[in-house]
Image (cartoon, rainbow, N blue to C red):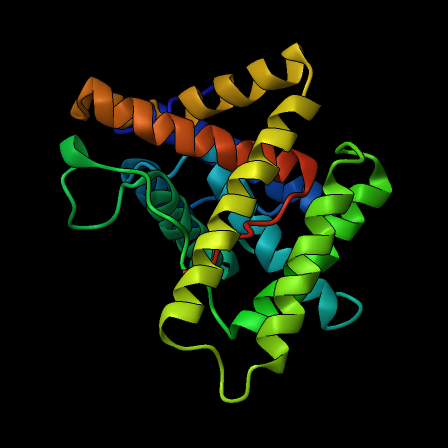
Amino acid sequence: MHDSRLTTHDSAADFCREIEAYLCQKNDGHLIRVVGPSFDLVSRWAADGVPLKVAFRGIDRYFERYYRKGPRRRPVRVDFCEADVLDVFDEWQRAVGLTKGASLVQAEAAPERRNGSLPLHLERVLLRLTNARAKGVVGIEVDSLIDRVSSDLDTARATSGGMRGDARRALLDRLGALDAELLNLGRAALDDVQRQTCERDADEELSGFRDRMTADAYDRARAALVDRLVRERLGLPVVSFT
């Protein structure tokens, strides 16, 4: 495993080789070398503290969009993935409280920002909850949660001009409570090995920042990241809306 914050030439080269191998896999075995300007680009990711798995998720995001455009015409170069890698890294930092310009010593877990309308958000939540339930990744208790989110969606749809004031705040509070309930269900659905894997992955992704954080800040960031990894493993949505 490689440290997520790499500064030496050898470490940067290791990071680049990992990225090169992953890109080769995504390109169905077609090797595109990470050399020259591409090496400099990926080395900056390493120097900036982009965890390897976060870089992988950014590459995945580019490929998902690329596949939606139709049959691929040429292998993807790592340079094409830069914007997605940096976007995912920015989302990762916000999720664990390591926002740009903020003190890492005072970092606190922060909710992810949501784009779009509240009804659209709730529709997406319902879809992902239904998919998770169909795959059996969470227990039957999620049926009740789906019913409550569905009810909130109906309320949001029926409100002319959108919800305002106390009614909106009450709904957002309720979604926050449902989100906490869903996370508890997700944690309970993991066995000990899966839970330990999430914790180990969180420690690995935060390893490059740990020396610059207080123990309390690290614990908060780690807890937020473990929750994020639990969601990813089980395909669970973020129910809360900010």
Q: Residue at x 36, y 51 (%)?
A: 90
Percent of width and height locating residue 13: 40, 30
Q: Which quarter of the rendering shows the C terminus? A: bottom left
List the single residue furthest toward the bottom. Answer: 161
Quarter of the figure with residue 165: bottom left
- Front one among 21 and 124: 124
Return the x and y of residue 202 as percentages of the image width and height.
45, 25
Residue at point 61% right, 64% down? Answer: 152
Left or right, 48 with reference to 233: left
Query: Left of 191 or right of it: where is 239?
Result: left
How far across and down, in percent of the image, does residue 40 sit? 34, 46
- All told, the count of numbered labels is 0
Residue occupying the point 65% across, 18% down: 194
Q: Residue at x 40, y 77 (%)?
A: 164
Rendered view: 138 above or below 91: above
Q: Is residue 59 above or below residue 190?
A: below
- What is the residue that sits farthest to the front in this orientation? 166
Judge whether residue 86 can be spotted in this image: yes
| The quadrant where residue 236 appears | top right
Residue 241, given in percent of the width and then of the height, sits at 47, 59
Q: Tell me: 63 left or right of 202.
A: right
